[in-house]
Amino acid sequence: MTRTVTLPARPEPLTVAVEETALIIVDMQNAYCSKGGYLDLVGFDVSGAAPVIAEAARIAAACREAGVPVIYLQNGFAPDQREVGGPAAPVWHKSNALKFMRANEAYAGKLITHGTWDYAIVSELTPEPDDILVPKSRYSGFAGTALEQILQARRIRTLLVCGVATNVCVESTIRDAYHREFFPVMLTDATMAAGPGAQAATEFNVATFFGWLSSGAELRAALMRNSLEQIDGRPL
C-alpha cells in the first residue's frame, strides 16, 4: 500500500507518496557553511549556518527513519580542474572560488577542491552508509551528473530540497527538477542564501513558479503522523 503524507506547504498543501520521495541535501560543505570556507573568504555572511545545519540533520534523520532516500550533492573540482574547461567555459569566469584562487596564490587548489577541508561536507551532516553522494561541478545538481538517473531508477517524483546557497545551487537544482517533471519542495528553514534579500527572492520564485515551500518541522510532523497511522492501522 502506498503511504502518503500531506505537507502543509505553500502556496497550497501538497500530498506526496513517501515511496516516491527523496531528500536532496545541497552542498552542505565547509566551503559554504564554515568560517574560513570559500563563501566566507569571498565576503558572504555564513553566520546563520548553524541552525540550518542543525535542521538539515533533523530532516535527514526523519527521512531515513521513514525510508526516504537521502541524497547529498557535493560541489567542487578535481585538483587539475579538469571539469572547469578553462577560459572558454562560463564557470571559469563566474565561479567566485576559482576567481579567488587565481587572485590569491596561497589558496590555489584549496577551495572546493576534491580532498580538501573546504570540499568536505560539514561534520554534523556526514553521510551515512546508505545515503547517496552525487558530486557535481556546476550549480545545478542535474548538470553533468547521474542525479536524474538515480531518481528515475527509484521511481522518485517528489524532491525535498535543502542546503546552500538558497539562491544559487538550491534554486538551480529546483528549477532543473521542475523542468524534468519532478515536484520540488524547498524546506526553507534548512536553507541559507548568499547575499542580502536573496532568501526571500528565491522563496518567491519557488512558490510562484517552480514548486512548493515547507519547513523541516512541518515535514517531520507529517512523517510522524504517517508513522503513527501505520502503527495504529488507521487509513492513510
Image (spheres, rainbow, N blue to C red):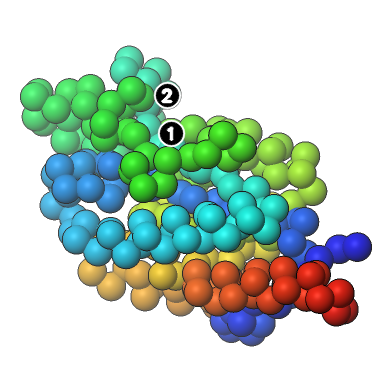
Q: Name the image quarter holding the N terminus.
A: bottom right
**Callout 1: helix, strand or loop?**
loop
Q: Are marks 1 and 2 in contact (CB under 8 Å)?
A: yes
Tell whether 122 sits left or right of 17.
left
The amino acid at mark 2 is: Glu
- For residue 182, say whether it is visible: no
Please give the name of the residue rendered at 26% of the width and 35% of the height, measured from the top-left corner.
118
Compute the Cα span from label 1 to label 2.
7 Å
Please give the name of the residue rendered at 55% of the width and 51% of the height, measured from the top-left corner.
24
Q: Which numbered marker is on residue 137?
A: 1
**Callout 2: helix, strand or loop?**
loop
The amino acid at mark 1 is: Ser
Please give the name of the residue rendered at 59% of the width and 75% of the height, measured from the top-left corner.
221
Q: Position of residue 153 (x, y in %)?
A: 77, 39
Q: Position of residue 194 (x, y in %)?
A: 28, 59
Q: Position of residue 151 (x, y in %)?
A: 70, 44
- State how many labels appear: 2
Q: Is residue 71 above or below residue 3?
A: above
- For residue 74, say whether it is visible: yes
Q: Is residue 155 above or below residue 234?
A: above
> In terms of depth relative to the viewer, which is nearer, 18 or 124?
124
Q: Is residue 154 above or below residue 89?
A: below
Q: What residue occupies the far front of the structure in this picture?
A: 232
Tell whether 60 sits left or right of 4.
left
Q: What residue occupies the far top of the structure in this picture?
A: 80
- Which residue position holds label 2? 83
Q: Is residue 41 above or below residue 136?
A: below
